[in-house]
Amino acid sequence: MNGNSIFLDTNILIYLLKGNKEIADLLNRKEFIISFITELELLSFPFEDKNEYNQIKKLLSECTII
């Protein structure tokens, strides 16, 4: 971890995935750290389509999961 790391919860990641510009601006250039519980919550989210699932998988691949 470094000064650019930020620990995120499920709601913030959902807002980010839904395109919330304020959240995106706040998180710009940050290293995302999430709990394994957040990972499980995101993967159990009711996906609208395969694209939404792929977005979540891509986001998770960029996170450090603890």
Image (spheres, rainbow, N blue to C red):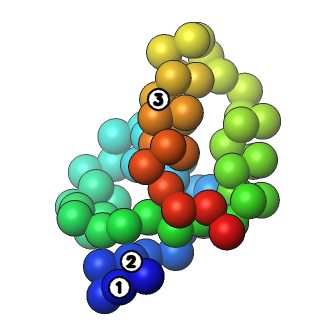
Instruction: Compare residues 11 and 42 and report the one nearer the observer.
Output: 42
Which circle, 1 or 2, is nearer the viewer? Answer: 1
Q: Which residue is mark 2?
A: 5
Q: Earlier in the sequence, mark 2 or mark 3?
A: 2
Amino acid under disc 3: Gln
Q: CA distance from mark 1 to mark 2?
A: 6 Å
Residue located at (52% from left, 75% from top): 7
Amino acid under disc 1: Asn
The percent coordinates of residue 1 (x first, y second) are 43, 82
Residue located at (28% from left, 55% from top): 24
Q: Which residue is mark 1?
A: 2
The answer to whether mark 1 and mark 2 are in CB contact below 8 A is: yes
Q: CA distance from mark 2 to mark 3?
A: 21 Å
The C terminus - image quarter: bottom right
Q: Secondary structure at mark 3?
A: helix
Q: Secondary structure at mark 1?
A: loop
Q: Please count the marks in the image.
A: 3
**Given the current orientation, which residue lies at the most extreme bottom position?**
3
Question: Is residue 25 visible from the viewing direction of this image?
Answer: yes
Q: Quadrant of residue 22?
A: bottom left
- 47 on left or right of 36: left
How many residues crowd mark 3 within 10 Å: few (<14), some (14–19), many (20+)?
few
Above or below, comparing residue 35 to residue 59 in the picture: below
Q: Which residue is mark 3?
A: 55
